[in-house]
Structures are given as structure tokens and as C-alpha cells.
Image (cartoon, coloured by chain):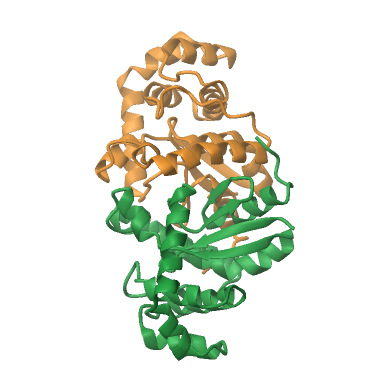
Chain colours: A orange, B green
């Protein structure tokens, strides 16, 4: 079965769309997805960006929020509720992801994004993450404790370095076993079609 | 019949894909397209960008060229041949567009983009533009002369100012009669679906 690595960042608005649609889309395409949380902050900083491009370029940012609403409606996702702060600090959510077994990461990621962009909640809030973990049947205290320990931190750092080495510059991104990099929620299906050999080769 | 304004910039790679696909896609969607050439340079400059973001951010630029190749293949367009200079100076091509009657602008725009990204030719070259105009049955000398006169220059300046007033920050863009702005080749069909009332409203 073809595999695609799915790189997402918790603060990213288009990662929201991709995370909520990825499981069904991958299944429909016959692709095995490897869910890879990473941090975009260090990658932006290495490009000389000290903030999200959506904040640095206001016309682009304003259009992004409207586009996000339209895309959510188009794909039958819940209406967008914009959090007060953007981008949010997704560090703790990303470390919690690393502290979970791989198979249980997708459900956690979906819950975090639904809370952030569907309910406008603050994902840097430990109490919110504990609530989401418990609702998923996880031992919230143990996961949050592990998120603060060296292995989870090192795993997230390694993922971010790997993303950068792959040429990733934004989120979400999709990488294939033969070395293609697809950037953006609107390339998700293209990445799957490439991985399964359906997409024509240039 | 629903109308969509189609904003394109001659130096823009994703405008290439949109220009080559727009006529067939609009016809399929039942949309009347108003073709609007404009200049992105002044709009980038107003955002503090002195060059294309694809040059300012090399990882993003490298991926754009690969994506462009893949998208061309996906849509059955000719293979991309990358011009030596990017972005090219599209000023003369844009002024020639303004010097043509509206109905004959789409064919000229298609010819310019095919020459630029399908053959890697220099679109700031007057001889190339003359050749393309002649092939289309235009009086090349007269069009090029009109392109250098005040009405064509003023029309292009007015289009660029109108684009900026509409919140346009990149190309291609699509605007609808009810005030929606869609940015990017990958939103072309979304814009058409919105204009005809097919797209769900958020």
C-alpha cells in the first residue's frame, strides 16, 4: 500500500482542513497515512519570517480567513470560529501528540483542531488538552506528564528537523516515498494520486 | 449569466495555468469571464515585497516550479519550460492587452503564456510580441504603437488600482459580482461555483 507522510502544524489554519479530511480522503484513495506533527516556527524563522505570513501581509490574511470559511462549507466541515489569538502556540499539543502511540494520534489531532477552529478555544491551555484527551479515553495526566519529558521533546525536534531537511516550508505538506513534496490542503488529493500512481508524471 | 472577473499578471506562473484553462472551465461552469490584466509589482511593493515571494523564499520557489510541472501534467497542458529570468517583465504584454478589443484579449494572453512557460521565451521582447500578434491576425505594428500611448497606459494603471482596491494581493485572482475574492489557480472552479450559486455559503 502506498504511503504518504502528512505533515501538519497545530497553529496552521489549512492544517485544520487537512486534518479533518485526511482520514476519509486517504481511505478513499487507498493510501496509508503517516501523521507527522511538526513545528513551523523554527522553519519560518530560518526563512526570516518572525510571524505568520497571514499576519505579515494583511490583505493575504484577510482573504485566508474568508477562504477558510468557504472551504469549510464546501467540504461539509463545521463553520469556522476564529480564535482570538492567531497563530496560537501549538507546542504543548504537538508534544502531547508525540507522547501518544502513533495509532491514537489522528483522533487527538482532529479533536485539537475542532476545538481551535471550530470552537475558537485556546490550544495552549493545559486544561483544554486534558479535557480532549479524557474524552478520547486517554490517561490525560500521564500523557501531559510525558509531553513534558525528554523523549517527546526530542521526537518533536527531530520531526521538525526532518521536515526542514525535506524542503518543507509550510503546512500542511505531504511527502511521498519517491521524494515528491506537495504543499497545502489543496494538494492533498494530488499527493495521494501521485503516491498510488494515478497522477500523470510530468 | 453570472460574471466573474479574472485577474491575471503576465509574470505569474499560476496565471499561466489559469489562463490556459479559463475559457473551457468558464464555459463548462456557465460563467461569463471578464479578462483583467493587471500588474502585481506595485501591489507587491505596497506590501513591502521587492521581488516575487518565490525568489525571496527559495524553498517555496523550488517547490512552486515542481508543482507547476505536476499541475500542467495533471491538467493535460504542455510541459513547462522555465524561462531564464523569473519573474519576467510583463509590462509591454499587459499594455498590448489593453490596446486590443476585449474580445481578442484572451487569445493574446494564451499565446503570451504559451510562449513564456511552454517555450521559455522572453515576453519583454517586442519582436516576440509582434510575432504572436501577427499569428493571431492582429496588426502587430498598430497594436504595439497603441500599447505605448496614453490610453493603454492609463487603462493598465486603472486596472492595477482597481485590483488593489478589491484587496487583490496575488495572481491569478477571481472576483464575483457579490464581492467575493478567490486567490489562486486552484480556486478558479470554486469562484465559478460561487458565482453560479452552486457553492454552499458559509
Q: Nearer the viewer, residue B65 or A102?
A: B65
Q: Position of residue B100 (x, y in %)?
A: 53, 78
Q: Is residue A189 above or below residue B11?
A: above
Q: Position of residue B129 (x, y in %)?
A: 43, 84
Residue lying at 46% horizontally and 67% vertically, measured from the top left:
B155
Q: Quadrant of the C terminus of chain B?
A: top right
Residue lying at 64% horizontally and 43% vertically, measured from the top left:
A25
Q: Is residue B70 above or below residue B97?
A: above
Q: Is residue B194 above or below residue A101?
A: below
Q: Position of residue B107 (x, y in %)?
A: 58, 77
Q: Is residue B175 left or right of residue B82?
A: right
Q: Position of residue A11 (x, y in %)?
A: 43, 31
Give the quarter of the image for residue A10: top left
Residue lying at 59% horizontally and 13% vertically, measured from the top left:
A135
Give the quarter of the image for residue B117: bottom left
Give the quarter of the image for residue B81: bottom left
Amino acid at each position: 500500500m502506498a504511503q504518504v507522510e502528512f505533515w501538519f502544524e497545530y497553529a496552521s489554519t489549512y492544517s485544520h482542513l487537512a486534518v479533518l479530511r485526511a482520514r476519509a480522503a486517504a481511505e478513499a484513495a487507498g493510501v496509508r497515512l503517516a501523521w507527522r506533527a511538526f513545528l513551523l516556527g523554527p522553519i519560518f524563522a530560518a526563512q526570516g519570517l518572525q510571524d505568520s505570513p497571514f499576519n505579515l501581509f494583511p490583505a493575504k490574511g484577510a482573504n485566508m480567513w474568508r477562504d477558510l470559511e468557504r472551504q469549510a462549507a464546501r467540504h461539509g466541515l463545521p463553520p469556522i470560529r476564529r480564535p482570538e489569538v492567531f497563530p496560537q502556540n501549538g507546542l504543548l499539543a504537538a508534544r502531547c501528540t508525540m507522547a501518544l502511540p502513533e495509532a491514537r494520534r489522528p483522533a487527538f489531532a482532529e479533536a485539537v483542531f475542532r476545538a481551535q477552529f471550530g470552537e475558537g478555544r485556546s490550544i495552549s491551555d493545559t486544561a483544554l488538552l486534558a479535557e480532549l484527551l479524557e474524552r478520547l479515553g486517554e490517561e490525560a495526566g500521564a500523557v501531559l506528564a510525558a509531553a513534558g519529558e525528554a523523549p517527546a521533546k526530542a521526537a518533536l525536534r527531530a520531526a521538525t528537523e526532518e521536515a526542514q531537511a525535506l524542503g518543507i516550508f509550510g503546512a500542511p505538506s505531504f511527502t511521498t516515498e519517491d521524494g515528491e513534496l506537495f504543499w497545502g490542503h489543496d494538494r492533498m488529493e494530488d499527493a495521494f494520486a501521485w503516491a498510488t500512481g494515478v497522477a500523470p508524471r510530468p
